[in-house]
């Protein structure tokens, strides 16, 4: 089922989400399916459960030959529950981000270039990956939602934050 995505200003988006304690349940699978359908419907790169009003530590993400990200490497379809992010090194990379919860706007956000993430899939199987670049950016963006952080909170230079149609006139750039 396609769910409504909460927009910036909704108090649920700035709350810290709870750990998932039980895996492989019908409710958890239904939540993930709703998240997938919602993300695909909006052509997003990822979605966090709090964005649809469910305050659980669940994110999904994946990018495959998406015209919105022509230069981005593919990111495998992933369900990541109770994630832990560990930066590798201190290298920070600036990059443009948008968000389904902050529609019509984009901004340059600093993120760790490389990181290791771990967590669980829907069945409770452990996931561990070391990633960099766009993949690392997507994971950090989605996991921020679990701690009540929206990407504008991370922007350092507000001259690089604005409405998509003004920043990128004539380009079809949608929200993440």
Image (tube, grey):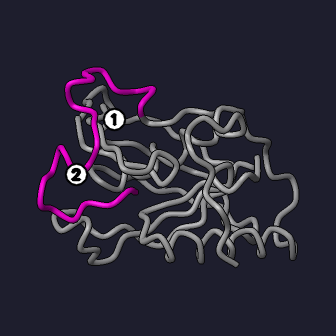
Q: Is residue 159 left or right of residue 37?
A: left
Q: SS of the residue at dot 2?
A: helix
Q: Nearer the viewer, mark 2 or mark 1?
A: 2
Front residue of 148 and 122? 148
Residue 40, horizontal then vertical, whole percent: 49, 76
Q: Which residue is mark 2?
A: 165
In which image quadrant can residue 62 be found?
Answer: bottom left
Residue 157, horizontal then vertical, whole percent: 25, 21
Residue 125, horizontal then vertical, whole percent: 70, 67
Q: Is residue 75 above or below residue 1?
A: above
Stretch in magenta: 152-176
Q: Identify the image quadrant of the N terminus.
A: bottom right
Q: Is residue 64 left or right of residue 99?
A: left
Q: Is residue 141 left or right of residue 106?
A: right
Q: Identify the image quadrant of the C terminus.
A: bottom left
Q: Residue at x 30, y 31 (%)?
A: 110
> How many other residues sit within 10 Å of disc 2, few (<14), some (14-19) or many (≥20)?
some
Label 2 – label 1 distance at C-alpha: 24 Å
Asked whether the beta carbons under mark 2 and mark 1 sit within 8 Å of each other, the answer is no
Q: Residue at x 55, y 39 (%)?
A: 8
> For residue 171, which numbered disc appears in the image?
none
Q: Is residue 31 left or right of residue 115?
A: right
> For residue 111, which numbered disc appears in the image?
1
Q: SS of the residue at dot 1?
A: strand
In which image quadrant can residue 151 be found?
Answer: top left
Q: Residue at x 75, y 65 (%)?
A: 124
Circle nearer the N terminus (2, 1): 1
Q: Is residue 83 above or below residue 109?
A: below
Front residue of 36 and 130? 36
Q: Residue at x 78, y 45 (%)?
A: 19
């Amino acid at each position: 089922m396609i769910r409504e995505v909460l927009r910036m200003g909704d108090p649920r988006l700035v709350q810290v989400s709870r750990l998932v304690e039980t895996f492989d349940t019908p409710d958890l699978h239904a939540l993930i399916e709703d998240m997938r359908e919602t993300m695909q419907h909006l052509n997003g790169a990822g979605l966090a459960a709090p964005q649809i009003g469910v305050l659980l530590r669940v994110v999904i993400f994946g990018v495959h030959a998406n015209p919105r990200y022509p230069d981005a490497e593919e990111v495998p379809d992933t369900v990541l529950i109770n994630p832990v992010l560990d930066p590798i090194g201190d290298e920070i990379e600036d990059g443009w981000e948008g968000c389904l919860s902050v529609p019509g706007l984009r901004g340059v956000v600093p993120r760790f270039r490389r990181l290791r993430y771990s967590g669980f899939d829907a069945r409770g199987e452990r996931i561990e990956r070391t990633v960099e670049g766009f993949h690392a950016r997507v994971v950090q963006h989605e996991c921020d939602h679990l701690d009540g952080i929206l990407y504008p909170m991370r922007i350092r230079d507000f001259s690089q934050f604005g409405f998509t149609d003004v920043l990128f006139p004539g380009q079809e750039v949608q929200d993440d």
